[in-house]
Amino acid sequence: MLSPVAVKPPASAGARIRVLIVDDSAVVRQVLSELLSADPLLRVIATAPDPLIALERLKVEWPDVIVTDVEMPRMDGVTFVRRIMAERPTPIVVCSSLTEKGAETTMEVLAAGAISVVTKPKLGIKQFLHESAQALTDAVKAAARARVGRARIAPMSGPKSGPKLTADVMLPPVTGEAMRMTTEKLIALGTSTGGTQALEAVLTQLPRVSPGIVVVQHMPERFTAAFAARLDSICEIHVKEAVNGDRVMPGVALIAPGGRHMMLRRNGAQYVVEVSDGPLVNRHKPSVDVLFRSVAKYAGKNALGIIMTGMGDDGARGLKEMRDAGAMTCAQDEASCVVFGMPKEAIRFGAVEHVIGLDQIPGMINRYGK
C-alpha cells in the first residue's frame, strides 16, 4: 500500500494541473515535460523511467494527472494502472506507440481505468510530439476534469491552435426530410473522454437482435481496431472497425476507424457507411458531428442519437440536426459521465430530448429497436 501520510493534497481550483510522466525513454520524458510545462495551466511535478520509481515518487506528491507508457521495464502499464486505481483513483493518460502489440495492451490499460490515449511513433518522436502538442495538452486537461473516484480540478481551457472546422468541410448541412424508404432503424453513438468504458458498459448489455449501431469514439489511428476486437470478444452483438461500404445491420456495431471520418449513406433501402479521409472537424477525426449530420440526412426519423461522456462540443450541432430531422435524441447525464462536456454542450444547444444515466442507455436502445 502507498502511504498517504506524506502525500500533498490535490491542487485547489484555479491551480495549475500537476502532472507525473512515466516513460522508459529519456527523450520522451524530456519532450513531454517541455511540451506540457509550456502550457500555463500545466505543471510537471516529476518524471520517472518506470512504474516502481513512479510509485516511490507518489509517496512525496500526488499528481492530478499521470501520463504513462504501457510497455515499460519492471512493471507493465496494465499492472501499474490497476495499482493506481486500487490505491487512489487518478486520471491517467496513456502515451503509447503505434504498434499492434501496443494497441492491444493499451486496450487493457483503458479497461483497467485509464482515461484516454495519445500516440507516439517509434521514429521521429521529437517532431511528432511537437506536432501533437495540442492533442497532448488537451488530453491532460480533459483528464484533469474526469471523475475517477474523487473531486477533480476544473481549469479553464487554454488557447487553441488552428481553425476549428465544422462538419461543412465533409458534407453540406441537412436540407429537407431524410430519405425514409426503409423500415430499418439504427443507433448513432458519439463519445470521447471516458467513452471506452462507457461504450463497454452499454454494448455488453445489448442482445444479439439489437438495431444496427454506428459509433464514433475519439481515438487515434490503429487503436480503434484493437478496441473493436476487444468489445467483440465480450459482447453478444458483433463489433468491428468499420471499412468503407460496410452495411449497417441489426446485431452489428461499426466503430469509426481512428484517423478517418465515418458517414452514413444509403444504398437502395439499406444503410451503409462511407469511411473517408478529410480535415479535422472540431479538431477530431473521426468527428461525431460528421457522423450525426450524415445520420440526420439519410436516416432522419429512423435513428436514435446518443451523445455520451467526453470533453468539448463535438456532436452537439450534429445531434441538433438529428433532432430537427425527427430522430430521437439522448444525452448521458452528468452523474454518470467521466467528463460532462459533450453532453452538456448538446443540452445547451437544444439537441437533447432525454437525459439519462449510463445504466439506462441499453434499455433505451432495446426499446427503440422494437
Image: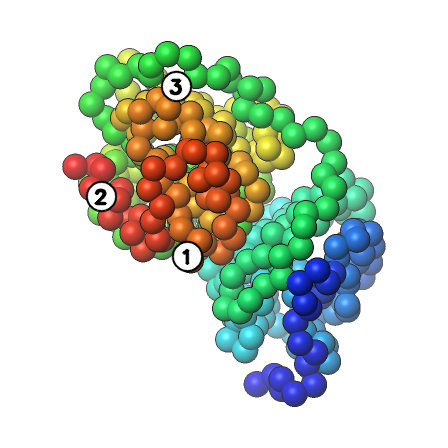
Q: Position of residue 323 (x, y in %)?
A: 36, 28
Left or right: 275 in relation to 118: left
Cα distance between the residues tagged 1 and 3? 30 Å
The amino acid at mark 2 is Asn
Q: Which of the image's four quarters has the N terminus?
A: bottom right
For residue 277, what is the image quadrant? top right
Image spot of residue 344 (x, y percent): 48, 44
Q: Nearer the viewer, residue 143 or 234?
A: 143
Residue 147: mark:
none
Residue located farthest toward the left when viewing the structure as drawn? 370
Q: Residue 370: horizontal and vertical position, in percent?
A: 16, 37
Disc 2 from disc 3: Cα separation? 23 Å
Q: Which residue is mark 2?
A: 366
Mark sitting on residue 336: 1
Secondary structure of the residue carrying tag 3 is: helix
At x 61% / y 52%, what residue is drawn? 142
- Disc 3: which residue: 297
Among the two numbered marks 2 and 3 on one chain, the one whose residue lies closer to the N terminus = 3
Counting residues from the N terminus, which is met first, the one under dot 1 or under dot 3?
3
Question: Which residue: 72% across, 43% down?
Answer: 134
